Image (tube, rainbow, N blue to C red):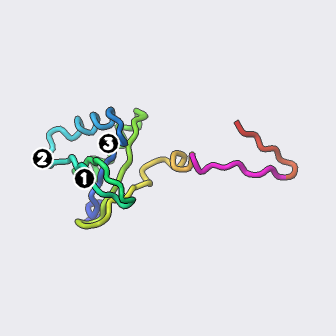
Amino acid sequence: MSESSDYTWYIDTCGDSRTNECIAQMLTGTSDECECWEQLCEDDKRRALWRCPDHEFLSRFEHHMKRYKYRYAIYKKKGKYGEIRLWQFSRPATVLRKNKHQAVPEQKGHHLVTA
């Protein structure tokens, strides 16, 4: 069993109706029930999630979403009874760090320019 098949993957639309519509269209024709409402996540918040049929679907979804600036988050659950956790590695590092960027104090001989 491969590592990606040990996980169940979920997409949270973050309340964005465009993302919700896109996922619904991509999942049309799948045999599984993919809507997972009120799922309790690791941070004790309940979310309406879409369950992905497999990791390949998730890869196609992310590739498709690169063209658009739609909001979404990816969650994963290990095994049958694991906690549903946010998966942060699918986003570019610059997106993850955008709020962590802090100005470095000015050093002797150097000028800090902020915009």
Q: Which residue is mark 3?
A: 61
User: Relative to 81, does residue 110 appear above or below in the rendering?
Assistant: above
> Is mark 1 in CB contact (under 8 Å) with mark 2?
no
In the image, what residue occupies the spot 35% across and 37% down? Answer: 64
Amino acid type, callout 2: Ser
Amino acid type, callout 1: Asp
Q: Is residue 98 magenta?
A: no
Task: Please provide the residue range marked out in magenta.
Answer: 99-107
Mark before the other along the chain sequence, 1 or 3: 1
Main secondary-structure element of the magenta-colored stretch: loop
User: Relative to 115, does residue 51 appear above or below in the rendering?
Assistant: below
In the image, what residue occupies the spot 15% across and 44% down? Answer: 30
Residue 31's disc number:
2
Residue 88 lies in what quarter of the image?
bottom left
- Comparing 109 with 47, the one in front is 47
Q: Residues within 10 Å of mark 2 (few under 14, many from 20)?
A: few
Mark before the other along the chain sequence, 3 or 2: 2
In the picture, measured across the screen, residue 107 lies left or right of residue 55, that is right
User: Relative to 7, does residue 114 appear above or below in the rendering?
Assistant: above
> Is mark 3 in CB contact (under 8 Å) with mark 2?
no
Mark before the other along the chain sequence, 1 or 2: 2
Task: Pick the quarter of the image with the C terminus.
Answer: top right
Residue 1 in percent (x, y) is at 24, 66
In the image, what residue occupies the spot 27% across and 54% down? Answer: 39
Q: Residues within 10 Å of mark 1 (few under 14, many from 20)?
A: some
Residue 12 in percent (x, y) is at 33, 46
Amino acid type, callout 3: Phe
> Is mark 1 in CB contact (under 8 Å) with mark 3?
no
Q: Is residue 106 magenta?
A: yes
Q: Secondary structure at mark 1?
A: loop
Q: Which residue is mark 1?
A: 54
- Comparing 42 with 28, the one in front is 42
